[in-house]
Image (spheres, rainbow, N blue to C red):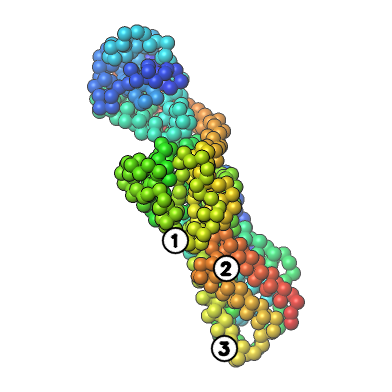
Amino acid sequence: MTDRTFLWLAQAFYAVSCVLTLRRLRAGGSGATLQRLNYAAMAVGFVLHTVFLYLRGQAVGRCPLTNLFETQAFIAWAAVLFFLLIGPSYRVSFLGAFTAPLVLLICLAALILPVDVVQAQPATRSAWVEFHAAIAILASGAFALAFVTGAMYLHQERQLKRRRLSSSFLLLPSIEQLDTINIRLLIMGFAMLTVGMLGGLVSYHIVGHWTKPKIIWAVSVWILYGALVMGRGLWTLRGRKVAVASMASFVLMLAGFWGVSLLGP
Amino acid sequence: MNLIVLGLNHRSAPVEVRERLAFAEGKLGEATCALLNAAPLYEAAILSTCNRVEIYGLANNATEASQAARRFLHEHHKLADSVDAYLYERHDHECIQHLLEVACGLDSMVLGETEILGQVKNAYHAAQQAGATGVVLNRLFQKAFSAAKHIRSSTAITRGSTSVGTVAVDLAEKIFGKLGKCTVMVIGTGEMSGVTARALQSRGAGTILVCSRTHERAEALAAQLQGRAISYDQWPAEFPAVDIVISSTAAPHPIVTREKLIPLMKTRRQRPLFLIDIAVPRDVERVCDELESVYLYDIDDLQQIARDNMSAREREIAACQVLIAQHLQRFAVWLEGNRAALEERYRNRVVATSLPKPAPTHAS
């Protein structure tokens, strides 16, 4: 049994969560039991996911961010972490309905595509490098949830505009609540990313192994989310536009990361 | 031994008849006792709402009991003519089924409404306190309550609002979340705008502003809603703070236009705006909903959603009937298992408060 098995097992639980959500939608959203089961499935998936990261960390002897596969698994893990923290505390109903499929998509892409290849690592370990990378990945978890709340916002907003309400309309949160959570996630993510970037600056000086495309990518992501948070803060961006932008930014970030990892250096 | 229900409802009788047969809520217990004295019933309960009057009873002989109960209704309400044509009567299984359907709101005028369960509970408690119920009706009503709860939670029979006012509230809650911080502006003082504003208020809407061309009317409605009346020309000035607009003026032309709205939305910093236009002809230009964060619903939109919700409830009837059949079956099994013991007890006219030996219980 390799560490990858645990990641596959985690996916099984995320898939169970998707099925439970569908059942809950079909039952018209009633059923606190289904909701608790759903949360439990995500939590068990998270534990298995954590076991995978731990085993992989032991195997590579450092924070498991040494290749594209590990990074994607780590981003998905951070997304589930944010879901488990935010879902109950903000009482966002059906947040899991949109989170689980996204997590599944990211993990399955990483598991199925041949991206789990050993890459040469610098001989010396630097705590700075690992800190900066890990905190930047946690920031992506917040951005993943901003993508999720953005998608939920658009789903609800479209129905309000079209005046055609589906059965899920009454079950999902209000657009104001989604808007509020979305911006909090963006601010949280941006703050963490900024700390990560500063850490990167230090580690670049110490180790100096960071390849150029990755730096350009990281700076672009920072500017992208910075602009989004600023735009919202200055009140020019709101509602629908923020939702679209937070979805687009996350896709651009992920696509950019796949790009620089596969093409560079 | 038979269970029997005798009564009338909004389908079998017009309101002129129903109101003559209605029992005052405070006198239900008294009336139930009078019924027990007047009719050969072991146990009885009377349910009286604005849409139905029903007598539930346990009798040794259904025909005799029914005749006596009809006489009781006639004499108690001092009726001049016969109401037999409006009355329906169901026995045994059909009686159980009827009570279950009533408790779930399947027999209500607004399908799936939930108020009826509380009314059935009141009827039961009144009868129970008057000592008119026994082992059978106690169990029947309690099973009906748990069946109603079960059916409500596992089907969509109560889901979705079915009136214009409550649909508007649902929409408002899906835009703003909690309505506590929302300011509502009522333009025009039609009856529907009062109803809609009151519905929003009952779900916690904060400030209410009322304006009308006739200032006295605005003040009257504002007083009713504990809101504030503002003069008709003032509404654009108040607009930046407003989240929900209910418009129902008799104006022949739109009073809220796209041109007026664009600068107002800027001052509101693109906060969402919910426009409820219940006027005919309409008060709000339809093109306003092209603006971002503006959600415009006219009377037809709201009615359409109410109708859609109603047909969604209608599609749930079959699922409800399946569950009702299960609950009915369980009660019927219990009743059959205890029939002999119960008949023995009641033959001696002992008011049964408990059974000698609980039956092999299929009932949960």
Sequence order check: which comes first, mark 3 or mark 1? 1
Q: Mark 3 points at which residue?
A: A202
Q: Could you tell me which chain the residue with mark 3 belongs to?
A: A
**Given the image, on which type of amino acid does mark 3 rest?**
Val
Q: What element carries label 3?
A: helix
Q: Is residue B258 above or below residue B160?
A: below
Most foreground residue, A148 or A109: A148
Q: Name the residue under label 2.
A: A143
Q: Tell me the quadrant of the picture where the N terminus of chain A can be found.
A: bottom right
The residue sitting at 43% across, 45% down in the picture is: B187
Residue B158, image x, y percentages: 47, 37
**Given the image, on which type of amino acid does mark 2 rest?**
Phe
Label number found at residue A107: none
Label 3 in the same subunit as label 1: yes
**Given the image, on which type of amino acid does mark 1 rest?**
Ser
Q: Name the residue under label 1.
A: A89
